[in-house]
Amino acid sequence: MNIKDAALHSGLPAKTIRYYDEIGLVTPPRDSNGYRAFQETELHQLVFVAHARALGFTIEDCRALLTLYKDDQRASADVKRIAKEHLKQIETKISDLQTMRDTLSHLIDECNGDQRPDCPILDNFRQL
Amino acid sequence: MNIKDAALHSGLPAKTIRYYDEIGLVTPPRDSNGYRAFQETELHQLVFVAHARALGFTIEDCRALLTLYKDDQRASADVKRIAKEHLKQIETKISDLQTMRDTLSHLIDECNGDQRPDCPILDNFRQL
DNA sequence: TTAAAGTATCCAGTTACTGGAAGGTCAAGA
DNA sequence: TCTTGACCTTCCAGTAACTGGATACTTTAA
């Protein structure tokens, strides 16, 4: 299967799949013409990575998860550890963004948004 | 005032301040020795940018806001528009992260996290 | 046969810094 | 006066994860 079909199958752009090959994340064998020849194995791996990336795992997380995925002897504890670590980071990000949202939302409410120059948003940014 | 004191004053790393100078965001005049000589104006601008960045505004947003900040004739409507646009993006990010968190959190709960290989997290990633 | 579609590699750009190297400047102490 | 150490400068490279574009080769269908 060529790259375009692998892209359709996994939902990833062909460019991204080439990139994953380049960094050694998912490395399909090649045909004699140099084209990437995706097998079931690589298709599964691409879908796997696509899902993990959609959940915000980094490429290096994906690499580790993929190693566990391929390992029949893995301990689910190892997977869970990585996932929990990532969950913690997601929760930190959410909380940071919520703080930003609350502050900004408050400032926006205070601003008249008319033709006059007075603006509590700028006033707030100005403060030392 | 030299860069180190400007850094202390604004809470930004000296490296970052040099970077802001390089991209033309905050451009202090120079002393005869080539050192950046920060005036009140640039100090205010650095603080302003630091606050805007802390709220997640991009550098280009900061550039636009800084232009409005310097403009006595600005309309607060322009500031409010940029801020609302940014707020929308923050809210989208929060919502995306919350979806991730819920999914991941659910998967983690389902995983035993023991020495056995069975793992609902991997199973989920595997599905086509 | 030829034109279009698909594939390949390689290079550069994105965002907002950050680290490090090489070298000039300044202030204080011996 | 000399030197040492703390500053300061610029420039180059690297980060994360792609993405766009140029150029060139291969395959497929009309």
Image: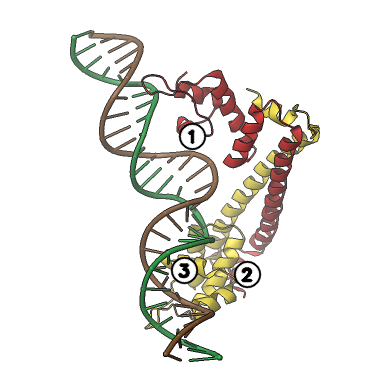
Chain colours: A yellow, B red, C brown, D green
Q: Are marks 3 and 2 on the same chain?
A: no
Relative to B108, residue B16 above or below: above
Query: Judging from the image, what secondary structure is the residue with disc 2 in?
Result: helix
Q: Where on the picture, by quarter, is residue A98?
A: top right
> Callout 1, which amino acid?
Thr
Query: Judging from the image, what secondary structure is the residue with disc 3 in?
Result: helix
Q: Where on the picture, by quarter, is residue A95?
A: top right
Q: Are marks 3 and 1 on the same chain?
A: no
> Callout 3, which amino acid?
Arg
Distance from Cα at disc 3 to Cα at disc 2: 24 Å
> Callout 2, which amino acid?
Asn
Pointer 3 chain? A
Distance from Cα at disc 2 to Cα at disc 1: 42 Å
Q: Residue at (52%, 72%) from the top-left corner?
A: A45
Give the labeled residue for mark 1: B16
Query: Judging from the image, what secondary structure is the residue with disc 1 in?
Result: helix
